Amino acid sequence: MDLNQFIRVVPDFPKPGISFKDITPLLLDAQAREACLQQLVAPLKELGATKVVGVEARGFFFGMAIARELGIGFVPVRKPGKLPFETVSESYELEYGTDTLEIHSDAISPGDRVILHDDVLATGGTAAASCALIQKLGGEVVACSFLMELSFLNGRERLSNKTIYSPLSY
């Protein structure tokens, strides 16, 4: 199934000059959503992963489903103040400022083999910060999974030592 037909391009969102890739039509279609999940899971099955880390918020959609398909745990990475227990944080550079992500301090154990999942690989800042959080807690990032990659933004450069899977690329 060609998943591209389920990605809606919204011009000038969230600001002029940006062509936003909206995954809502993909989420609305049960067959497309299942085909997408199977495309995401296929390369991850033999990695021996113990957990999937999903990045707030759109990384939760398929991150949780990937964890279910693989029969492993799911861990959310969130913006500051959203997790109720003790956290570890990582700040990272944005185009115009910084941002911070947090993970529960007990979510990853030393030796965990982790798949990082988010909806989009753009500049790689969020993914790199998430990988740093996983590694701070003793986990090994065995793969980075994305629904789509915006290759013109060169996010792979920030993840140069990571294995990256993405069924869609723009």
Image (cartoon, rainbow, N blue to C red):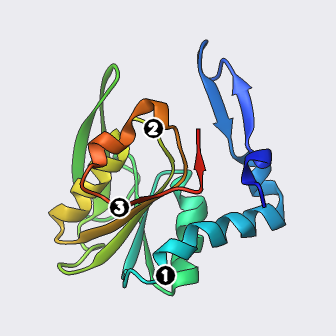
Crowding around mark 3 (Cα neighbors within 10 Å: few <14, some 14 to 19, many 20+) is few
Mark 2 or mark 3, whichever is nearer to me? 3
Reading the image, the residue beneath label 3 is 163
Looking at the rendered structure, the kind of residue marked 3 is Thr
Crowding around mark 1 (Cα neighbors within 10 Å: few <14, some 14 to 19, many 20+) is few
17, 106: nearer the viewer: 17
Residue 24 image point, x, y percent: 74, 47
First of labels 1, 2 by sequence position = 1
Residue 140 higher or lower than 152, as above or below: below
Quadrant (top left, top right, bottom left, bottom right) of the N terminus = bottom right
Residue 21 image point, x, y percent: 65, 36
Residue 25 image point, x, y percent: 79, 48
Reading the image, the residue beneath label 2 is 122
The residue positioned 25% from the left and 63% from the top of the image is 134
Crowding around mark 2 (Cα neighbors within 10 Å: few <14, some 14 to 19, many 20+) is some
Q: Secondary structure at mark 1?
A: loop
57, 7: nearer the viewer: 7
Residue 156 image point, x, y percent: 36, 44
Quadrant of the rendered image containing residue 52 = bottom left
Q: Using residue 165 as the reference point, say whether residue 91 is left or right of it.
A: left
First of labels 2, 3 by sequence position = 2
Residue 111 higher or lower than 6, as above or below: below
Q: Are marks 1 and 2 in contact (CB under 8 Å)?
A: no
Residue 108 visible in this rendered orientation of the protein: yes
The residue positioned 33% from the left and 19% from the top of the image is 96
Q: Using residue 109 as the reference point, say whether residue 61 is left or right of it.
A: right
Reading the image, the residue beneath label 1 is 45
